[in-house]
Image (cartoon, rainbow, N blue to C red):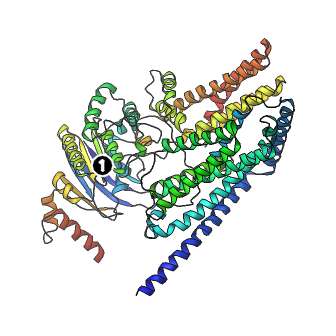
Amino acid sequence: MIFIWHLQMVNVMTDLQKLFSQRLSRHAGQLLKYLRLVFTDHFVIALFFFFGALGFAYQNELKRLTLGVWWGPWLTMLILVITLQMGRLATLLEPADAVFLLPAETTLHQYLKHARNYSLLMASFIQIAVGVVLLPFLARGDQMTLLEAAILIMTQLITKAAWMNWQLQQGVQQVKHSIGQVRLVNWLGAIVIFGLSLFVSVWVGLIAALLALSASIAGLGKRWHNGQLAWQSLITNENGRMMVLYRFFNLFTDVPQVKATVRRRRYLDPLWKLVIGHSTNPYLFLFTRGLGRDSDTFGLITRLTVMGMIILIFLTNQWASLVVMLLAIYLIGFQLLPFYREYEGKVFTHLFPVTKGQQLSAFKTVLTDVLTICAVLFVIVDVAVNWSWLRLLIDVVAMAAELIIFIGWYSGWRLRKS
Amino acid sequence: MGIEVEHLVGGYSQVPVLKDVSFSVADGEVVGLIGLNGAGKSTTINHIIGLLTPIRGHIQLGGVDLKTDPSAYKQQIAYIPELPVLYDELTLQETLTLTMMAYGLDVEKTWIRAHELLKTFRLDNKLNWFPANFSKGMRQKVMIVNAFMTNAKVFIIDEPFLGLDPVAVHDLLQLIEEARGRGAAVLMSTHVLANAEKYCDRFILLNQGEVKVSGTLDQLRAAFPDVGGSLDDIYLALANGERND
C-alpha cells in the first residue's frame, strides 16, 4: 500500500516538474504567435528608423555633455530604479489550478522555483540591455570606470533577484502584504541601494544588494516548507501580468482575452450634463455614458485624435494638413458608427417605449459633439503651428462642411443601410 | 384587460414552438406559468414583451395591440428577465434613472420609491457602483428594483427566485402581492412550485408548446384527480405522463 502511494507521489512530482516546461512552451508559442502579428515588415522598418534616430540623438547629446554633470547620478538612479520594476514573476498559473493542483500544493514549490528562475532570466535581459545602453552615459556623465559600471549593473541584477524572491514570497506565505507595502519596499529599497552605489561607492551598493538577496533567500526558505500557497494572489497576479501582455498585443491585433473594461471616469460627468441638458431622451443618456466609459471606443477616439494632432504638428504644408484633418475626422466618425448598435443585444433596449427616431437623433447628437470636439482640437493645433487668418478660415469651413455632410447625410444613410 | 393571449402560434424561426396558446391574466391577478424546461415558457414571455412577432394569433396588453401602438403597449410592461441584463457602462443610480427616462416617469417621485426598494434589498449604499460587476443575486435584486419602482400595469417575471437569498425571496413575493393589490396583472414563470402554489391565483401548465391545463389549484386538482393535492404532485404527474407518451 505504502509502496503504491509512494509511486503515485513520485508520479505527481515528476509530472509537476514537467508541468512548468509544458506551460512554458505553450506560453512561448502563444507569445510568438502574437509577436509575429506585431512585428510586421512595416512596423519593423518603422522601429528600425525610430531606434536609429534615437541612438543618433543619444550619441549627439553625449558629445555635448560636460564631464561629470551634477544631475548625472540622479538621472542614473531614476533610470535604474524604474528599470528594476520591469519584469514580473511569471508563474504561468491558471485559475483552474487552484482547484486541480490544490492537492499537490507542497510539491508545487519546485514548479514555482522553475517559474522564478525563468522570470529572473527574462527580467535580467531587460536589466542588462538598459545597463549596456547606459554605459556611455555612466562613463561621461557619472565619470565611472568600466569596473565601477560593471559592478553597478551587477548590483542591478542582484537586486532584481532579491525582488523576484520577495515577489515569490508574497505567493508562498499566507499573510500577504498590501500592494502599497510591496510597492513601497520595491521603490524605496531600490532608491536606497542605488543611492549607496551612486553617492557613496559602488562597492557599498553591491554589499547592500547582496544583503537584500540573502535576506530574501532566508525569508523565502523560512516559508518554503510551510506548505501553503496564497492561491488567490498568485492567480490574480498571473492574470494581471497576462492582461498587460494581451492589452499590448490588442493594440495591433484582436486578442479574444481582452474584454472591454468599463471605467467610471467621474471627471466626464459634467460633460454629459452639458451634452444632455434638459433632454429626456434615454438614448442620449445611454450613448454618452457608453461612449465615455467603454474603454474600447473611448480609447479609439482618443488614440486617433492624439495621433492626428501629432501628425498636424509636423506638417507645414497647408493642403497636406487639411487632408489629414478631413481623413482623421472621417475615420473617427466611421469607427463610431457601429456604436449605434452597441445595445441591440440588451432586451431592455427593445422594451423601452422609445422610437427608432429618438434613438437615431440621440446618436447623431453624440456624434456631433464628439466630432466637433475633435475637429476643434485639430484646427487649434493646425493654426497654432502655422498661424494665418486664411488658414484658420479654410480649416473651419472645410471641417464644418465635412461635419454637416457626415452627420447630416452620410451617417443616417450608413446606419439605415446596415 | 390585463394580458390577453389568443391563439398564439410563434417561435424563433418558421418552426413554431408555441402551438395555439391562449390564456389571459386579469388585472389584480397573479398567474403562474409552469412547465418543464423547453415547454415554451420563455418563448411565451418573449412574445408578450414584444421581442418575437407572432406567426398567428394576437396579444393585447390593457386592450392595446403591439402592432397598432407599440409605445403604449410597451409603456405598460415591467419585465424581470430570467438572467439579469444590465448595461455594463451604467452605475446602479444611472441604470434606474435610464429606466425612469425611458418610461417617462416623474424622476423625483420615482426615486423616493426606488430608495425604499434599494433599502429593502440592501443596495442603497451601492448607488455609484457598476451593477454589472455584482453577484448574480445582487444583479437580480437590481432587476427587481428596476421593475417594481415603476407603476407598471403588467408585470412579466421570468423565473425570479434563482440566486436570491431567502430574505429577498420573501421581499419579492411581498412586492408581487402589493402589485396585485394595486390592480396590476402579474405573469410569473417559475420552477419553485411551493412559492407558486402559495402566491399565484391561477396556473397555466405549458407542455410542448401547448396549454395542457389551466385554472386555480382546485381546478387543477379536479383535472388530475388521483395524483395528490399539491401543485408539486400535479406537476410530476404531468411530467411523468409526458415521459410515458
Which is more toward the observer, A206 or A295? A206
Asked whether the viewer can see residue A88, the reply is no
Which is more toward the observer, A248 or A285? A248
- Residue A352, quarter of picture: top left
Element marked by disc 1:
strand
B31 left or right, relative to A108: left
- Residue B213, quarter of picture: bottom left
Quarter that holds the N terminus of chain A: bottom left
Which is more toward the observer, A358 or A295? A295
Local crowd at mark 1 within 10 Å, few (<14), some, or many (≥20)?
many
Q: State the residue position of label 1.
A: B157
Which is more toward the observer, A32 or A145? A145
Quarter that holds the C terminus of chain A: top right
Asked if residue A111 is positioned above or below residue B84 in the image, the reply reads: below
B140 left or right, relative to A230: left
Asked if residue A379 is positioned above or below residue A172 in the image, the reply reads: above
Residue furthest top as drawn:
A389
Asked if residue A163 is positioned above or below residue A297 in the image, the reply reads: below
Q: Point out residue B159 in the picture as x, y percentages from the top left corner.
A: 30, 54
Asked whether the viewer can see residue B166, the reply is yes
Chain hosting mark 1 = B
Q: Point out residue A229 in the picture as x, y percentages from the top left corner.
A: 45, 60
B97 left or right, relative to A34: left
x 58%, y 25%: residue: A369
A136 left or right, relative to A177: right
Q: Point out residue B20 in the picture as x, y percentages from the top left corner.
A: 33, 58
Q: Point out residue A159 in the picture as x, y percentages from the top left corner.
A: 63, 49
Count of numbered circles in the view:
1
What kind of residue is marked 1? Ile
